[in-house]
Image: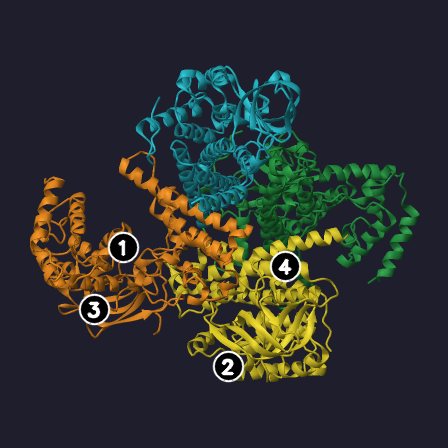
Chain colours: A yellow, B cyan, C orange, D green
Amino acid sequence: MADTTNAIAFTEEQDAFREVVARFLATRAPAADVRALVEAGRPYDADVWQALAQELGVTGLHLPEACGGGGFGPVELGIVLEEMGRQLYTGPYFTSSIMAGCALHSADADAQAALFPTLADGSSIAALALDSLSDPARLGLSITASADGAHLDGTAPIVPGGLEADVLLVLVAADYGLGLFRVSAADVEISPLQSLDPARPVASIRFANSPAERIGTLSPQSVQRLWDTLSILLAHELVGAAEALLYGTVEYMEQRMQFGRPIASFQALKHRCADLLMEVELAKALAREGARVLASDASPTEIAHMAKSMASDAAMSAARAGIQLRGGIGFTWENDTHFYFKRIKSAEVLFGTPQQHREWLMTHLEATAHAH
Amino acid sequence: MADTTNAIAFTEEQDAFREVVARFLATRAPAADVRALVEAGRPYDADVWQALAQELGVTGLHLPEACGGGGFGPVELGIVLEEMGRQLYTGPYFTSSIMAGCALHSADADAQAALFPTLADGSSIAALALDSLSDPARLGLSITASADGAHLDGTAPIVPGGLEADVLLVLVAADYGLGLFRVSAADVEISPLQSLDPARPVASIRFANSPAERIGTLSPQSVQRLWDTLSILLAHELVGAAEALLYGTVEYMEQRMQFGRPIASFQALKHRCADLLMEVELAKALAREGARVLASDASPTEIAHMAKSMASDAAMSAARAGIQLRGGIGFTWENDTHFYFKRIKSAEVLFGTPQQHREWLMTHLEATAHAH
Amino acid sequence: MPTEQEIRSEVSAWLEANWRVDRPLREWREMLLEARWAAPAWPEAFYGRGYTVAEAGIVTKTFRAHGAVGAASVGPRTLAAETILAHGSADQKHRHLPPILTGQFSWTQLFSEPGSGSDLAGLSTRAEKRGEDWIINGQKVWNTSAHHADFGILVARTDWDLPKHQGISYFLIDMRQAGVEARPLRQMNGHASFNEVFMTDAVVPAADMLGAEGEGWRIAMTTLSIERSGFGRDRSADPLATRDGPIYDEYAEEVRIAIEPYTWYPQRAGRADLLLDRARETGAIANPAARQEIAKALILAKGAALANQAAEAQRRSGSNEVAPAGSIGKLAASTIARQCSAAHTLIQGDAALLAGADDGAEGIASEVLLSVPAISIAGGTDEIQRNIVSERVLGMPKEPRFDTGPFRDIPRNAPKDS
Amino acid sequence: MPTEQEIRSEVSAWLEANWRVDRPLREWREMLLEARWAAPAWPEAFYGRGYTVAEAGIVTKTFRAHGAVGAASVGPRTLAAETILAHGSADQKHRHLPPILTGQFSWTQLFSEPGSGSDLAGLSTRAEKRGEDWIINGQKVWNTSAHHADFGILVARTDWDLPKHQGISYFLIDMRQAGVEARPLRQMNGHASFNEVFMTDAVVPAADMLGAEGEGWRIAMTTLSIERSGFGRDRSADPLATRDGPIYDEYAEEVRIAIEPYTWYPQRAGRADLLLDRARETGAIANPAARQEIAKALILAKGAALANQAAEAQRRSGSNEVAPAGSIGKLAASTIARQCSAAHTLIQGDAALLAGADDGAEGIASEVLLSVPAISIAGGTDEIQRNIVSERVLGMPKEPRFDTGPFRDIPRNAPKDS
């Protein structure tokens, strides 16, 4: 199992890994292909997914080596997600490998042994069916388990990646905590929803006496850690998207002539880009620190709130600038910018808005201050 | 008694009145004189004050004609305050004529007959000693009246204009509502405080068995109306200050050469000024609407919250821009800009911050929605 | 000068004698034209009565009171009509104005190009004289209703050696010809309100150059000032269009086609009007952070409305105080829309991940989120408005220009391959 | 090359033999100079040992471990010393460097002028040759510690017919002469951290021009890059200064004078560190709006600190990824300070009307409110930083220049009358 270093700089191996992932995505799943996939109604390219699993081994990057995973840590996951954010990857990586994969860390050993290998080799796609996407305190309240725990009833109204999944992980509130259940996608009613982010499909999932197996329990601490983890990793995706927008926009501005000069030479526009770079750099530093803290023994809660709120705000600034600085063309369907905008807008709410994370941060700081 | 029109445009008389006030202040009490007054430790020029009372008749502008006042309304008061804001008038107009004068509208007829004439002719200066400057719900809680109502105890910790006043009006919470008391400045302990805004001195006032006379009672509705009125009138002062800053800064930028061109020709700086003008114009429109609503039968609460929060935010933008766009010189004591900054910063909190007014606005909108 | 009463009586008498809901729309419009009620503010020599704007307003009001349909006026056709009236030859007016007023032909505006957006005068559509015709090659974009239009008002470059503003001419182009292709242009919000128009050896007879060669920029300024003043911008559904009767049905169809491109405009403005109700529905009204954002939006919207009223009042009263309007209002509209979008996001909560009818707000909230970016671009970007405000209202110096001299020497965008 | 251990042993041995707290400071510094411990990174020819930065660091650490005072180094004197070392003649180095190291003479920097702030090269202080002297006339501003200084590093214009950057020369000026007057410059926060310096027929001997005539801009760039790299920016009180003993008292006084101008710098940076505690004290911690503003400030501050660490780490590791630092950090610092000021206002509540000790926060909160505007100006305005970031980091094109050609023809500010 590879070392995840806690140093602020990436190791040479990590730099090289990023290079490989970046090159793969730029070649096999570039942002320029998103429009064609969306227009074709295909969420993603199955060959690319298989290659991600087999050639790059990133689908199980963070899963135990014993289960066919890579045994890597959050820093490497962060690298993958930054690059996927940059290319706006449309496949179920975030929903299956990350959301479901991280939830499975709270599953019992048998379930892990059964599910990790199929997630790692890309043969199975999972989804985490949460009934609240923006408030961990409301998780599991609208789904109930039968007395024997063998059936579920209720609804997860918005499930990212729900359409693509063959296996569902479900959180259900009970007196013992949050139960983690496994349900086959064949046993539930999955209804596609119109996704604001067409590059990340969502569905509603209804459980009606659906056969289920309870595979674990999440304590309040595990729920918080799961939420922190997902927030930090989503922040990486947002940072990657923001960087792609920023540098892509600057490139466009250097080409675009108006009034006899490239629009990149207009001071007001230059200054907007400079401010944006500052925002993005801070967001990147926070997200990456989040991954390092996840890899350490320290609590990731404080940095998770910081990283998600700043990454969301910075990425939204980048998305707005990306459209505005392109003028009319930035608002057209034929230009890629709006796909970034939609990813970022939808991620703004996922796992909590920047405002929620700031409020949670204050609550956390007060709680830890009183604990001392 | 002159008509206060409810039309959105000023009348010719009102335009002419503004002209007179503006010319008077620009000649007799210009912003350029503030530094000298502050350095001399003189809050204001007594001759100018007398002239405001006798020549212009603005000290009693809104007081009844029968009591030596002008019988004018909030629109004319707004005109005076915009112009005073523009020149950063340092005298006790806002604290005596406006704060105390408006509170006296809730006094009984005898007290009004006794106090209005001396306020109108400038011979007496009053101050409204509030024990909370930013939350009407906390008014009068730290001052108590003796059982017979003839003496007061307690503290008003920050009283704008408290040093200059010879008579104090005090709000005291009681079971019958908020009692309005008159106290002679000779009977209290007045301690000067360091004011953030050196052009508006403040003091703490301690009542220790101080002889007092109860001259009226404020219902919750009258308190709200008083607060709304003061908020709207302060918004006018802020708008005047913001306009003076904006146009003064643009003028400076047109003179100031760097890199062989006036800095007013740099696009990023031009755009900042354009955005600022937009903010200031909206703030001005809200403040002026506030004065018109005060002059009508409608409730001023909604517009008061809007006007104060927008005026405060716009003026703060103007103050920041005024310093920043002047560069180092804008941060020096010898330049006038900081006096505007300090007035605006201190007014940001007075009668509630923009955040408080926005929260109050929502509460008000919900209350009126449910009342329908 | 007729009095208000005289006008009202004359119109009423004529409508009582002639208005019938079972008349075909075209026949009715021909009668309007003949009776000079189609455009009473136009000169007597050209279909009008030389009425003042106020007098013409009385005619319109009287028509409305009778429930009578007037001349065709919705959409870009009015821009064309007013420009032709101002700059056209007698022949051009006689050929083009009647079919505009009767609604026989609809028009589109062919000004912006992919390579010249904010910098409209940087256009590079080419018009070359060949015999008695002008041959047009180039691409236009943001052309409202171009796929329905019979004619277009077009600016194209006739001289590449003159400075940019001087080499432009103005044409009236027949859209129904092989050399003109209009393609719908889909936007990020899913609507296709505009077209791209490709002109490949398209032909304009010399008789349809408006004004003289090289006068195109000056004439385009007329069109743009008409557009800015709000003429031809009636984007709300006319209540007449919902009445029962054959002529109303024909009229409703005409209006429907003309206003279709504008259906999402209320959403791009942010829908401040929905914030409170939606927040009550979703419960976000109890969220302090959402309350701040909602309040900010409401305050900006109220401030902008009041500032606009104040500017109007000042214009009317001729007060001395400068009334900065137009561009400031447009900047405010962008600010309001962005603030609304921020508030709607918080109000939506989880549902902000959803689009269309699934968003729990009949698709309106999600359309706000996806349409707001347009408001700070369309009709002149915020950046251009800030230039205008700082230079024309605040009197700050213009930036130095880099696009003087012969147009062919000015660095410009390569034409898009397509 | 000596090893770390060898250096440490040699220094320790020397200190054990020589360091005494009852020695007069000047005498001690002369000994340091003689023994070449005053500036071990300088070349052997000039008071040093040619040590690397790392080796010199070991010397400093060993001094600290012994509680021994080193050469004078706080304040602008180090800028002068390093610049003279880089560009001075042997004579200049021998005359000026020893009294800097011993602390005998202190220095100030005479660069900015009222008429040239962001545009430093637009300076118009005049230096004219008269016999063997240069006669200086003009005004400088933002001169730290000028009223205490014995000498100044000065840039002045020696040729008005050359382009602006080429007509500037660099001088070492004696501040203790009749033609030089330093006046404290009071700021809006009440502090007077800087001076204005008026030079009226002030004299600099030809031997004190640094470098050749016209090389002033190039040499000033050296000074500025030393300044930016943080040299001479040690603004924290030295722990040695608080120790007991005669030499420590002398040293404490030297440090006190040198760092006095910087006492309010923590406040101009916004004091993010105080937000939580102050909010708990005033109860604002329970106010949702204040919580949002406090959280924003904490997040920005943490993000900036981490981004700075990451940039440092990249510089050290020589990674390929571009590490945009300096100017981005400065922009972030301004943003953080403004955000802190907004949060402190909400935290203060009514007390935001008060200044000084009356503010309930020992004057710190109100000083934050009144000092924060400086951070986006001092040391290069935010606007200049944004130019730098967009051009040097993002590679965007520079704006065209309007200040080429002979300096006398460039439009510039009239000198301030005073």
Find residue C219 and report its horizontal and vertical position in percent: 22, 54
Q: In the picture, which quadrant includes the N terminus of chain A?
A: bottom right
Q: Which residue is mark 2?
A: A45
- Identified by mark 3, the residue type is Met
Q: Which residue is mark 4?
A: A305
Q: Is residue A361 visible?
A: yes
Q: Nearer the viewer, mark 1 or mark 3?
A: 1
- Identified by mark 1, the residue type is Arg
Q: Which residue is mark 3?
A: C175
Identified at 52% across, 55% down, the residue is C284
Decide which of B230, D73 is in the foreground and name it: B230
Element type at marker 4?
helix
In the rendered structure, find residue C233 and report the number of the disc placed on it.
1
Q: Is A69 placed above or below B342 here? A: below
Cα gap from disc 4 to disc 2, whole angstroms:
33 Å
Cα gap from disc 1 to disc 4, whole angstroms:
47 Å
Decide which of C261, B259 is in the foreground and name it: C261
- Identified by mark 2, the residue type is Asp
Q: Is residue C141 left or right of residue D245?
A: left
Find residue D360 and report its horizontal and vertical position in percent: 68, 35
Find residue B195 and report its horizontal and vertical position in percent: 61, 30
Element type at marker 2?
loop
